[in-house]
Image (spheres, grey):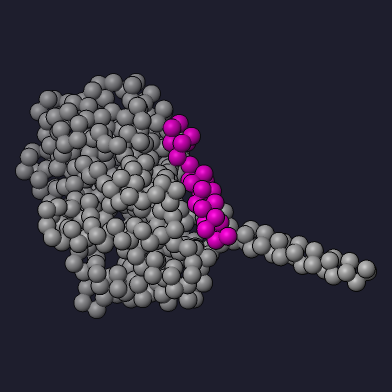
Amino acid sequence: MSSSRTALGEAEMAAKREVHAKAVAVERPLRILMIAPTSFFSDYGGHIRILEETYTLQGMGHEVAIVTYYKGSDMPGLDIRRTAPLPWRAEYEVGSSRHKIAFDVYLAWQSLVEAMRFKPDVIHGHMHEGALIGGVLAKLLRRPLVFDFQGSMTAEMTDHNFLRKDGRLYRLAFRLENFINKMPQAILTSSLKATRLLEEQFQLPSDKLVPLPDCANPRRFDPDQFTPEMKQQLRQQLGLPTDTPLVAYLGLMTDYQGIPHLIEAAVRLKQAGEKVHFLIMGYPNVARYKSIAQQKGVSDIITFTGKVQYQHAPAYLSLGDIAVAPKMSTSEGSGKLLNYMALGQPVVAYDSAVHREYLGDLGVYAPSGDVAAFTEAIAVLLRQPEHRRELGQQLRQRALQTYSWQKAGEQIVSLYKQLTK
């Protein structure tokens, strides 16, 4: 009898030890291998999402290694592991490029090398190439794959004029995108619109999709840290007029982002006699847009800064009285809006599902592509300084309450733990 009780006690103790071991395993810091098929870090778009996600996960005690292309800025505190450079291609192009296939072959090899060294618990692929490479690694290592979906691959390639929607290559690319979308165990979507696109256009089950909109960093983008004296000094450094309302933009400088529409809005406002100056920040194509502004006679009311490093972005953006989002793409996120919101700036934007998701009823909208309406929306705010301040304050509160990276980090970690049980 005693021997049977002893055996039973030992079995119970073994079961308890197993439960305890599993609990410890769940609570230990996770090791996350992120695959970023881009020149991380660069000061625009999806790079901000990767950066803030990583800092948030590290702040929660988890280990993150980022595998990315050869070029890009090394950010403090991040474990970034880069590919070798292509022998025949020292420079990288923004957007779609025929060289990108070679970049991704190098990235796939480096990801395999780093996965063997790092031994991740989870593979987190950004963009479709990252998900494809991550999907192969996930099968080899028997690890879960999380896909960070920031927009349709084929739609983005069409926006960049790399594909024609009626072409044969588009159909092949769409099939590849459909294949990649089915590889991960879970997909983080950067907007509710993206979630609906995956459900409706790619027939993915809703329980596989986790909406995780881009978030704001209200400490970094805090308007109270910039005094009037600091802003006045920066205005002088940039050669900006001291007593003129500023319309600010920070992001990629491309046609599909709406830069020609900003120049045209400046033309119309100047013709109408409005007192205004445009502060347009970002890259590439700066020389081209400067030339267009000069040809149209508005170079005196537009300042192009070129590339602005992320650490300087809050100070530069804080100069704006009105922020603008003339992006016409319906397939991608628009995370720059959150920086505008966190800084307490009113936003004039083209009317799209993604813009409305962030701004709600507090945005000032114009029909997409309608330059005349966009210009008039700016003009109305120029004449209403008190309304501008009220909208800005409400937008900052919306950013603080709804778009928190800490809450997003908790959601990501919860997903990781479900997949690693």
Give the number of marks. Answer: 0
**Magenta segment boundaries in residue numbering:** 397-421
Of residues 365 and 18, the one nearer the viewer is 18
Q: Where residue 262 appears, x then y in whole percent?
A: 18, 38
- Give the quadrant of residue 101: bottom left
Q: Residue at x 33, y 50 (%)?
A: 203
Left or right relative to 16: residue 281: left
Quadrant where the image shows the C terminus: bottom right
Left or right relative to 346: residue 301: left
The answer to whether 410 is drawn above or below residue 36 in the figure is above
Q: Residue at x 28, y 21 (%)?
A: 384
Of residues 325 and 3, the one nearer the viewer is 3
Instruction: Kindly report the secondary structure that dominates the magenta region of the rendered protein.
Output: helix
Q: Residue at x 34, y 57 (%)?
A: 181
Residue farthest toward the bottom in the current orientation of the protein: 87
Of residues 311 and 3, the one nearer the viewer is 3
The answer to whether 201 is drawn above or below residue 68 in the figure is above
Residue 83 is at least partly visible in this image = no
Quadrant where the image shows the N terminus: bottom right
Residue farthest toward the front in the current orientation of the protein: 1
